[in-house]
Every structure is written in C-alpha cells, then in structure tokens.
Image (spheres, rainbow, N blue to C red):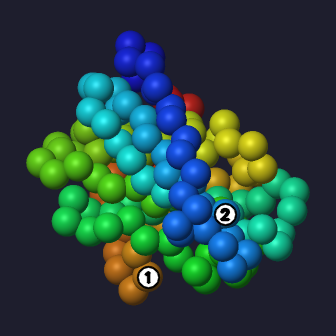
Amino acid sequence: MGLVRQSLLILPRPDLSGRGRDIVEFRLRAHDGVRLWGLLARSEWHGGDRPAFIRVAGPTERPEIDPETLQEGSADFVFQSPAGRRLEDRVLDVVRVHQVALATQGIDPDRVTFAAPRGGREPDEFMIARQLIDGQFC
C-alpha cells in the first residue's frame, strides 16, 4: 500500500451541494495505481467531529449520497468499485478509502464504519477490510 502514493484530489461539487449539505468529489490512486473516485457528503447543520460511513457502489452504479445518513449528522463516503477488480484489490480499495476518511478534517476517526446497502448484505470486501484494520495489519 505504501508503494503507490494516494494522490488525493478533492473537487467541489456545487451542482450536488446545497439544501444544507456540502458534497465534494474525491479521486485517489489505489494500491496498484488504478484511479478510484467517489463522493463525500456532510451536513452543514451539524458541526464538530462527526461519524462517517463508507459505502461502495458497483461498477455499473452511480455513487449516490444517502440523505438519511446526512440527516443523522454523519458524513457519507461512497465510492465506485472499478469493473473487473479481484476481491483482494477491492479489499485494499476499501482500506485506502478508510485511510482517506480517517485523515479527513471534521471526521471522528473512532467512528468511521462500513455500511452495507440499505436492505442488502455487507460486501465481502468490507468484512475482510474490517478484520485487517481491527487487527492493525493496515
């Protein structure tokens, strides 16, 4: 993971922001150099360090912000998984986005969690990434 720089780029998204929410697009490099992109949304009504949820959209899905997460005062990180990624690459993609979340100002690093799709089951990469992070392997 340390061999490829994150090369994090944050882009304002005024077209998606407004109505009490601030949304930015983030782009970063995965461990193997593949470009990852997603959205970070925060409520403008809640101040201080807040919890954050990390979600993943499939290769054919558009990353969409979860309005309920924002209403609860949490930040929402949702990124798109590139097509054709092997499980081990998807796990490291999740770990990379988790590192970005931990380093983001206004996010409580002790309350960053993975969120399964509403009504869906948790992706395998979340379960494996959580074990790596909790075991302090990453």
Residue 7 position (above or below residue 44): above
Q: Is residue 41 visible?
A: no
Which mark is nearer the camera, 2 or 1? Answer: 2
**Which picture quadrant has residue 73?**
bottom right
Residue 23 position (above or below residue 102): below
- Label ID, residue 30: none
- Label ID, residue 118: 1
Q: Secondary structure at mark 1?
A: loop
**On the image, numbered disc 2 is attached to which residue?**
22
* Residue 108, x across and y down, in percent: 76, 51
Residue 67 position (above or below residue 91): below
Q: Residues within 10 Å of mark 1 (few under 14, many from 20)?
A: few
* Residue 89, x across and y down, in percent: 26, 38
Amino acid type at circle 2 is Asp
State the residue at coordinates (12%, 48%): 84
57 horizontally vs 137: left or right: left
